Image (cartoon, grey):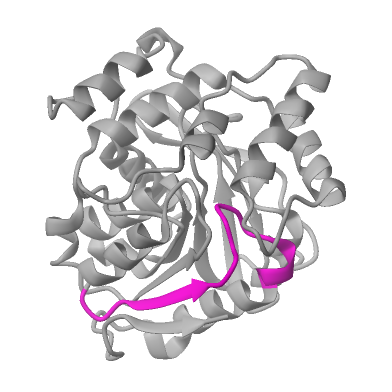
Amino acid sequence: MYSIDTASPEARAHVSDGIELAYQEFGSSSAVPLLLVMGLGGPMVAWDDAFCLALAERGFRVIRFDNRDCGHSTHLDACGIPDMAAMFGQLAAGLPVQAPYLLSHMADDAVGLLDALEIASAHVVGVSMGGMIAQEMAIRHPRRVASLTSIMSTTGRPGLPAARPEAMSALMTPTPSDWPGYLARHRQVWSVLCGYKYPYDPVRGDAMAQRLFAHGPHPAGTARQLAGVLASGNRKPALADVRIPTLVVHGSDDGLVPMACGIDTAEAIPDARLRILEGMGHNLPFELWPAIVDAIAEQAGPANTLTVHATTNQQAYQN
């Protein structure tokens, strides 16, 4: 039993051959499990402690973790660093892309963590790449996912709008290994990715940068994760068979994964609900935490634990 107002000590779990994931928990160990899956290169601490605590206070056993090749989980450095320019060129030419691993492997990692924690099923919330991993969990392991919340993510369908050039340029900027350089890059990237209504908050943003830097950036692992995203292809046909209660959340001013990608996700999954947050970019601004926590809690509530969801497809909200 863990206190709702603190995190459990960080631990590691063996989830598959050669892969261990670092994780932490918030809330009671006997509460309803809710698994948080972070995006590209983001360690578990990118889920702010206060955000996790807010979910724990809603009655959940909140579990956050480092994906493979990130933070304190297994690094696959023996796989080398992908040639991202070549991969983007192959993708643009319609050629197959090879990567050390795929999103499906990362989804299997997450299910392996549930196995290690002896959790039969959990409500799963993923952001950006984490939303893609959560979608793969719903496709590959539907009995393990009680509900799905996909935030600022995409189906990977070809033809969807591309990232704005300035957003992609910011994302591809090399990550410095020194703290002043890391902080400067963090400010640059998130000043671009935050939406017009919720600009970069230097107090909260710089504090987050400090936590991320202390947890240990791993740019080579981030490159391999991005390669896995590019090589994983189109999930939309498989998502048509998902019968899990689903909520899709997206910002109207997302420059990295445009809003059309969220709409496409909601269209792909039968009876998915869609919530558009006006002025939100590719981040979770502090001002919207109450709305996002409420939406997750409502989605993962007792009425939504069945495998059939009865709401109208693409029920949209404006905030």
Report whether 196 appears left or right of 84.
right
Report the residue at 71% width, 52% height from top.
Answer: 8
Q: Which of the 4 quarters of the picture holds residue 297? A: bottom right
Region in magenta:
270-289
Report whether 243 appears left or right of 108.
left
Q: Which of the 4 quarters of the picture holds residue 286? A: bottom right
Please name whichever residue, 238 or 3, is drawn nearer the observer in this view of the structure: 238
* x and y percentages locating residue 313 in the rendered image: 26, 83
Residue 272: say if magenta: yes
Please name whichever residue, 140 or 311, is drawn nearer the observer in this view of the structure: 311
Please say whether residue 177 is visible from this viewpoint: yes
In the depicted structure, whether residue 277 falls above or below residue 160 = below
Please name whichever residue, 64 or 222, is drawn nearer the observer in this view of the structure: 222
* x and y percentages locating residue 37 in the rendered image: 49, 51
Residue 6: say if magenta: no
Q: Residue furthest right?
A: 203
Please say whether residue 100 is visible from this viewpoint: no
* x and y percentages locating residue 293 in the rendered image: 61, 74
Report the residue at 52% width, 29% height from top.
Answer: 169
Please state the total of marks drawn on the protein image.
0
* x and y percentages locating residue 223 in the rendered image: 44, 22
Please name whichever residue, 196 or 111, is drawn nearer the observer in this view of the structure: 196
Report the residue at 46% width, 68% height from top.
Answer: 249
In the depicted structure, whether residue 301 falls above or below residue 41 = below
Q: Which of the 4 quarters of the picture holds residue 292? A: bottom right
Q: Quadrant of the N terminus?
A: bottom right
In the depicted structure, whether residue 59 falls above or below residue 220 = below
Q: Quadrant of the C terminus?
A: bottom right
Report the residue at 31% width, 62% height from top.
Answer: 144
